[in-house]
Image (cartoon, grey):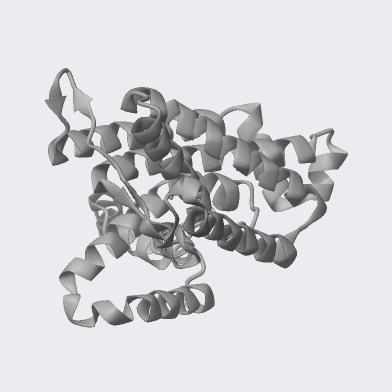
Amino acid sequence: MVGFFIITGYAGQPALGHAAFFGVGAYTSAILTTNYAVNFWLSIPLAFLAAGIMGGLLGLISIRMKDDFLAITSIGINFVIVAVFQYSEFFGGSLGISVKRPYFFGLKFTATGYLILVAIMILGTILLIMKMKRSWFGLALSSIRNDETAAASFGIDVNRYKVLAFAIGTAIAGMTGAVYAHHMTFIYSSDFAFIVSISILSMVVIGGVGTIRGPIFGAILLGAAPELFRFFADYRMIVYGGLLVFMMRFQSQGFLGYDSVLLKLLSRLRPGRLEKKEGEIHG
């Protein structure tokens, strides 16, 4: 989700096939460790690189396409990549690929180990994005999101920064895909279908586009929802779609986006603000 934030929330590019690059990382790591005896820890940066290269190619496509055309193209790429996974014997075909759990200092990785690893990856990615926001690169992406023509008039190489945004965002997805593959110990093409891209989009939009906290909150909220509401698990995607329509119509900033209703409510309930109001009343 945080990688998707860089592309859509930060650079403003409507790419809707993010799950495909998540799958590229997962399959890269699975094949390298299973067929070529590559160490799991080495497969993570290789998956990062493979997904980043694929994302860079999509970035090159984005130079020629904008808005709805780019969104539709990214959806098509998602379907193509999933079809390659499903019908190519090299990627396991319709049978998928079994993946072995990695070892750390001779001990098999446990669920707690994966939790710590994912937490470190999330923290590292957040620190990277915060550093990026304060840099010239971050300012360039923000200007492209607001107005590409105006950004170009100020000397920003719009095409270059678009490609970089796609490459970085998809590379992060590939890195997490590598960890996902070894945690699940089995991957199949449908794990990275377009419906997964919609889930990622839902998490970002519902949490708050353009913020770091938004995608994280959206992931926690929609990740916990199926466990809390198992009685309508079969209708999960209908609920996600309904939430997307509702949020885009009535609360496009998401729950924790800039100027969202929830943030305004929380700001009113802050103790400092209440004390200030009481002081103004007594004064």
Residue at horizontal 45 percent and vertical 68 percent from the top: 195
Q: Does residue 154 lie above or below 271 as drawn?
A: above
Q: Position of residue 192 (x, y in %)?
A: 44, 57
Quadrant assignment for the C terminus = bottom left
For residue 111, side relative to residue 252 (left or right):
left
The answer to whether residue 235 shows anywhere in this view is: yes
- The residue at 79%/48% (across/down) is 63
Q: Position of residue 1 (x, y in %)?
A: 43, 50
Residue that extends furthest to the front in the rendered view of this protein: 89
How many numbered circles are shown?
0
Residue at 42%, 60% in the rendered image: 94
Q: Which residue sits at x=35%, y=37%?
A: 122
Q: Residue 161, how many percent across, how many down?
A: 71, 37
Of residue 199 and residue 79, the one placed in the foreground of this image is 79
Quadrant housing residue 153 = top right
Q: Looking at the picture, does residue 3 appear above or below residue 29? A: below
In the figure, is residue 121 to the left or right of 226?
right
Q: Residue furthest right?
A: 153
Left or right position of 86 against 224: right
Percent coordinates x, y for residue 270 in the rendering: 27, 53
- Against 206, residue 258 (above or below) is above
Q: Please tell me which residue lies in front, 33 or 126.
A: 33
Is residue 168 at least partly visible in the picture? no
